[in-house]
């Protein structure tokens, strides 16, 4: 993917590069409504888009899609660039291209985050950046929450919500012969020998219950039904379900010991 030569039908090895003088001349024509100049300018800056999307390699995104979104950012930068300002076009355009791609990735994330949550998260990040610049010290969550007038728990929730999920197969370390993946660092309490031993013991104990007790235990603790729901299903009173449930649990406890 990183060495792809053709993107969206464009041969990246043949993309032209414009000089500063050529860009200036084209901008003058663009401001006068010259459509041909717009096309030439965009084509002459496609390598700028390519350099930006390299930052987003390895995220599982389609490179063609990122390139197209980056081109939208490029066009927006071209339309809003002010020649009178003493700044290079690339300096102005890169943040706009990056922003366009990040918005695309955020809005197309498989985990949907509400707009209000995203907005608060980005406000919090803005406050964090401002305070860090002013004090040369990173603010606490409490400081950010106080600045925005919201609870600190809400700030934590919003910031967590915009974090990009990663694959369990994402490598976190490699020595050239063997990789360590995220899944290798995630503990699973349900996969321990003790858990399986306990589960097998409970299953074996349930085999020794009578049919009605077994049915009640399965519906109550494996299917999550209430006593009232179980009583309605099997045609007995809630009091009877409660009594049989307690009897079954005591029976299992005796066997388990």
Image: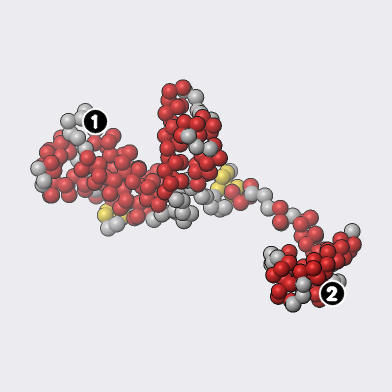
Q: Nearer the viewer, residue 249 or 198?
A: 249
Point 13% across, 41% down: residue:
31
Using the image, determine if residue 28 lies above or below residue 247: above
Assign a secondary structure to mark 1: loop
State which tag comes first along the sequence, 1 or 2: 1
Q: Quadrant of residue 124?
A: top left
Using the image, determine if residue 20 lies above or below residue 177: above
Residue 110: x and y in percent read 46, 56
Tag of residue 87: 1
Mark toward the viewer: 1 or 2: 2
Point 40% across, 52% down: residue:
107
Q: Is residue 22 visible?
A: no
Tag of residue 215: none
Residue lying at the far top of the rendered structure: 135
Q: Residues within 10 Å of mark 2 (few under 14, many from 20)?
A: few
Q: Nearer the viewer, residue 69 or 124?
A: 124
Quadrant position of the C terminus in the picture: bottom right
Residue 128: x and y in percent read 46, 32
* Relative horizontal placement of residue 196, taking residue 181 as reference (left or right): right
Residue 102: x and y in percent read 38, 46
Measure the C-alpha gap from mark 1 to mark 2. 83 Å
Residue 251: x and y in percent read 87, 65
The residue that label 2 is drawn on is 210
* Relative horizontal placement of residue 225, taking residue 200 as reference (left or right): left
Q: Residues within 10 Å of mark 1 (few under 14, many from 20)?
A: few
Assign a secondary structure to mark 2: loop
Using the image, determine if residue 217 lies above or below residue 135: below
């Amino acid at each position: 993917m990183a060495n792809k030569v053709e993107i969206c039908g464009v041969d990246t090895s043949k993309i032209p590069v414009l000089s500063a003088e050529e860009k200036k001349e084209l901008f003058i024509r663009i401001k006068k409504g010259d459509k041909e100049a717009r096309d030439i300018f965009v084509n002459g800056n496609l390598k700028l888009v390519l350099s930006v999307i390299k930052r987003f390699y390895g995220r599982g995104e389609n490179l063609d899609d990122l390139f197209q979104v980056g081109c939208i950012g490029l066009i927006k930068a071209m339309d809003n660039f002010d020649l009178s300002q003493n700044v290079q076009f690339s300096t102005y355009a890169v943040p706009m291209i990056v922003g366009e791609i990040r918005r695309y990735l955020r809005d197309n994330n498989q985990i949907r985050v509400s707009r209000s949550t995203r907005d608060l998260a980005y406000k919090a990040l803005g406050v964090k950046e401002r305070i860090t610049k002013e004090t040369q010290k990173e603010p606490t969550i409490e400081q950010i929450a106080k600045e925005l007038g919201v609870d600190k728990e809400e700030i934590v929730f919003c910031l967590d919500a915009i974090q990009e999920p990663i694959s369990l197969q994402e490598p976190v370390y490699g020595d050239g012969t063997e990789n360590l993946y995220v899944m290798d660092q995630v503990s699973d309490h349900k996969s321990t020998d003790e858990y399986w031993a306990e589960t097998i013991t409970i299953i074996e104990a349930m085999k020794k219950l009578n049919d009605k007790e077994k049915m009640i235990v399965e519906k109550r603790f494996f299917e999550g039904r209430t006593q009232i729901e179980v009583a309605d299903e099997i045609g007995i009173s809630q009091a009877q379900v409660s009594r049989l449930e307690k009897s079954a649990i005591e029976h299992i406890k005796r066997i388990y010991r």
